[in-house]
């Protein structure tokens, strides 16, 4: 049987971050403005380290480069996914990501970014930015030129348990009082459209208006819901999304259930409760990967997990 790869998260301080990664997850965080936990990442800006077993001390990026067999021989220069927990104490800037085609041409061959958000918790009056109200590129350009941000930006109420798929070209922002589990393509290309005219060290943060206008889809169209639920013994497995980059599932367990690891590899984050996988204890805040060919595994306990894998292209 192959080993479970348990990972040590990397933390990022952000001007908009808070302390919930310590308060809710008991992580040792670097300061009182910690915005992001990079839970499963092989990105050079935050490469997770294996914290147990045969690969202890090695980074996920090293495993991807040296032991591709653990990932079913998946192709690609970079580990394809990045999983984060985001604690937004203040509003994040309003942004948009390019798709693979635009990023390849304008960002030195980089990947575009599709991402998705599961709302772990939020304040009762919390909101989120998804989309905009411009009917055409011309209207988008004139609303931006005239700084009609309140007419342009689409703000929606948000609730614990909501899920959003953010396709490239979608205007989006996480707003204050929101705790999110984000699963995304492993890319950092972000165009900042608007930052509420805030100052950071006395200066406004850099915006990327031209590139934003290039990539924003007009008019905005919501992604239609794809959530579906199946039961396996004592587990309820809800598919949150399946797109060409990733599939994401939420697992609610109260008891025990056996599954078969048939993907090239599968990522898990324990987001509530505790239990075990094949007898190894796991609890809220644990993140791990089941490698290729792991086979049958048994989860037991009372917990909520979010799991993701690279969608097979049929
Ligand atoms: Zn984003």
Image (tube, rainbow, N blue to C red):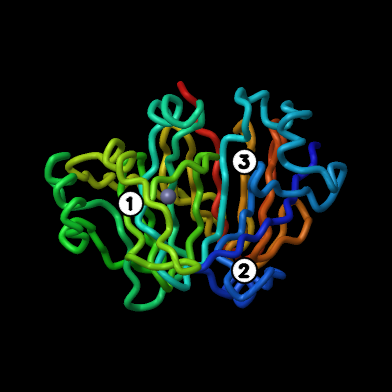
Sequence-first tag of 1 and 3: 1
At a point 43% along the width and 62% down the height, the residue shown is 119
Disc number placed over residue 109 in the picture, else none? none
Q: Secondary structure at mark 1?
A: strand
Q: Secondary structure at mark 3?
A: strand
Disc number placed over residue 193 in the picture, else none? 1
Q: Specify the quadrant that holds the C terminus.
A: top left
Point out the residue furthest to the front here: 202
Q: Which residue was labeled with disc 2?
A: 273
Give the Cα distance between marks 2 and 1: 38 Å
Q: Secondary structure at mark 2?
A: strand
Question: In which image quadrant can residue 286 be found?
Answer: bottom right
Disc nearest the viewer among 2 and 1: 1
Q: Is residue 219 above or below residue 193?
A: above
Q: Is mark 1 within 8 Å of ligand 1?
A: no
Asked if residue 203 lies left or right of residue 252, the reply is: left
Question: In which image quadrant can residue 14 be found?
Answer: bottom right
Q: Position of residue 234 (x, y in %)?
A: 56, 57
Q: Nearer the viewer, residue 235 or 74?
A: 74
Q: Position of residue 52 (x, y in %)?
A: 83, 51
Q: Which residue was labeled with disc 3?
A: 266
Give the Cα distance between marks 3 and 2: 20 Å
Q: Position of residue 138 (x, y in %)?
A: 13, 40
Q: Do tag 2 and tag 1 residues touch (Cβ < 8 Å)? A: no
Q: Nearer the viewer, residue 31 or 266?
A: 31
């Amino acid at each position: 049987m192959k080993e479970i790869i348990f990972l040590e998260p990397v933390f990022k301080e952000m001007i908009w971050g808070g302390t919930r990664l310590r308060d809710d997850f008991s992580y040792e965080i670097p300061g009182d403005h910690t915005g992001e936990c990079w839970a499963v990442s092989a990105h050079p800006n935050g490469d997770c380290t294996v914290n147990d077993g045969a690969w202890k001390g090695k980074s996920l990026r090293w495993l991807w480069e040296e032991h591709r067999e653990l990932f079913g021989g998946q192709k690609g220069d970079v580990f394809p996914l990045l999983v984060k927990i985001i604690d937004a104490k203040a509003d994040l800037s309003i942004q948009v990501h390019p798709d693979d085609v635009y990023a390849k041409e304008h960002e030195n061959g980089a990947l575009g970014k599709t991402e998705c958000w599961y709302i772990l918790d939020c304040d009762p009056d919390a909101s989120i930015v998804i989309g905009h109200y411009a009917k055409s590129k011309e209207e988008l350009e004139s609303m931006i030129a005239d700084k009609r941000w309140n007419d342009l930006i689409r703000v929606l109420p948000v609730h614990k348990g909501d899920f959003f798929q953010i396709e490239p070209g979608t205007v989006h922002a996480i707003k204050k009082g929101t705790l999110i589990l984000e699963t995304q393509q492993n890319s950092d290309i972000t165009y900042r459209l608007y930052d509420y005219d805030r100052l950071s060290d006395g200066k406004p943060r850099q915006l990327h208006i031209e590139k934003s206008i290039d990539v924003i889809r007009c008019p905005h169209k919501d992604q239609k819901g794809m959530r579906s639920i199946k039961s396996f013994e004592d587990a309820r497995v809800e598919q949150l999304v399946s797109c060409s980059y990733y599939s994401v599932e939420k697992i609610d367990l109260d008891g025990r259930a056996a599954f078969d690891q048939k993907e090239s590899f599968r990522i898990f984050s324990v987001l509530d409760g505790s239990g075990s996988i094949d007898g190894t204890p796991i609890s809220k805040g644990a993140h791990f990967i089941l490698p290729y060919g792991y086979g049958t595994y048994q989860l037991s306990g009372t917990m909520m997990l979010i799991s993701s894998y690279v969608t097979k292209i049929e």
